[in-house]
Image (cartoon, rainbow, N blue to C red):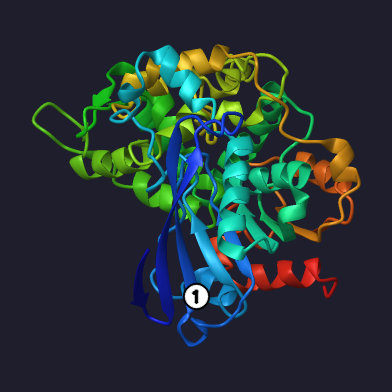
Amino acid sequence: MTRYRQPGLVLTDHRFSVPLDHADPEGERIEVYGREAVASDQAGADLPWLVYLEGGPGFGARRFIGRQAWLGRAVQEFRVLLLDQRGTGHSTPANRQTLPLRGTPRQQADHLAHFRADSIVKDCELIRRRLTGGARWTVLGQSFGGFCAVHYLSTAPEGLQTVLITGGLPSLHHDADAVYRAAFPRMRRKAEAHYARYPQDVERARRIAAHLVERPVSLPNGGLLTAPSFQSLGSLLGGGEGTHQLHLLLEDAFVPTAEGPALSDAFLENVQYLLSHAGHPLYAVLHEAIYAQGQGPTAWAADRVRAEFPGFDAERTLTGDAPLLFTGETVHPWHFETDPALRPLRETAHLLAERADWAPLYDPARLAANEVPVAAAVYHDDLYVDTAHSLETARAIRGLRTWVTDEFEHDGVRAGGPRVLDRLLALARGEG
């Protein structure tokens, strides 16, 4: 273990050896990393543990500096473990550089089948017993981390003291197709709200899309910016400041050149940063697998369902005068053509999309008999997780208390910080 300090905190790096396949505990093992954070003035105290599960899939736990955001509130009463879920951060990262070590695309796909919520929760249970001596702990799950928390309630509630979920109550029954049929109308609403705030962006977005339909543009990292990949910048609209960030991105997209107007280097650099999966490739590779529960292959659900919503077709839009619609929270086969971080994983991703033997993730009967205190923040029109699906799940989990709010977007636990965590703790304790 390595121990060091930041303002107001003592931090300790932990590395745990866990089975790749928990059904084969004597088989191959991988390493999972977690960063312990405790208030400096309580470093030696016997505090209860809180484990944080980041959103995603594919993102390591946020790297805080000192007592930022909700962490400052959490360390007032908890010893916090910021867990990099398997395949992310420092936890045996899975990406275009490491996955070829597994062998063929088929072998890579079989390997990644062990990187869903079920395996993550089993990792948590091994880690909990090692850190707490068997005591229960509190889970804080953001977005996909909330999906993991609901699986935790379904399979190992004996390890849980309290569960806190922010923007991450999954559907217990809906398949990936249903998830995306609910998502595209939300994307339309978010785009329409953006244009209502910034009407000048209607023409700007159409001009950029028309330019890209005529001639896609190479990005500095070797990626390709096409009209559909430009539309996927709508993922910004799921965050509290996202509409403003998108507006600032669009306002100076073009510069004059000797060959005529061109997309500026500065614009392309910013777009590259926003679109690249280099830091989180599992977000794309495993995205639809998080919805798969014994209902057959996902078969590129978002791409198939998008065809049911012709308003998202950029070329068709440009033949008329309608605003260009943005997308977000969808992964398509073309991502594995346009993004150099994903191109080497193209065949692996296709094999995962064809996989039909995904196990169910949730146990409705066990959730209906739940005895663990659970509180969940549900955002009124969340771009990433359908509000109606979340509330349906909230009703199915015995004793779960919800806070439905339009004060925050999907990133509320970051934007609201201590206040969001305070509210959820009060709800879970029956105080709110």
Where in the figure is residue 212, as x and y percent of width and height?
A: 32, 24
The answer to whether residue 89 of the structure is visible from this angle is yes
Depth check: give the residue in front, 46 or 361.
46
- Which residue has dot 1 on it? 38
Depth check: give the residue in front, 9 or 285.
9
Q: Residue furthest bottom?
A: 41
* Residue at image point 71% right, 25% down: 293
Where in the figure is residue 372, as x and y percent of width and height?
A: 81, 57
Depth check: give the residue in front, 353 or 246.
353
* Number of marks present in the image shown: 1
Where in the figure is residue 8, as x and y percent of width and height?
A: 43, 82
The answer to whether residue 206 of the structure is visible from this angle is no
From the viewer's perspective, is 396 left or right of 129? right
Q: Residue furthest left?
A: 258
Where in the figure is residue 390, as x and y percent of width and height?
A: 76, 44
* Residue at image point 41% right, 71% down: 11
Give the image quarter of residue 340: top left
* Residue at image point 91% right, 47% down: 369
State whether residue 310 is above or below residue 147: above
Give the image quarter of residue 101: top left
| SS of the residue under disc 1 | strand
* Residue at image point 36% right, 22% down: 102
* Quadrant the C terminus occupies: bottom right
Looking at numbered disc 1 in the image, what kind of residue is underneath it?
A: Val
From the viewer's perspective, is 209 left or right of 138? left
Q: Residue furthest front?
A: 26
Q: Residues within 10 Å of mark 1 (few under 14, many from 20)?
A: many
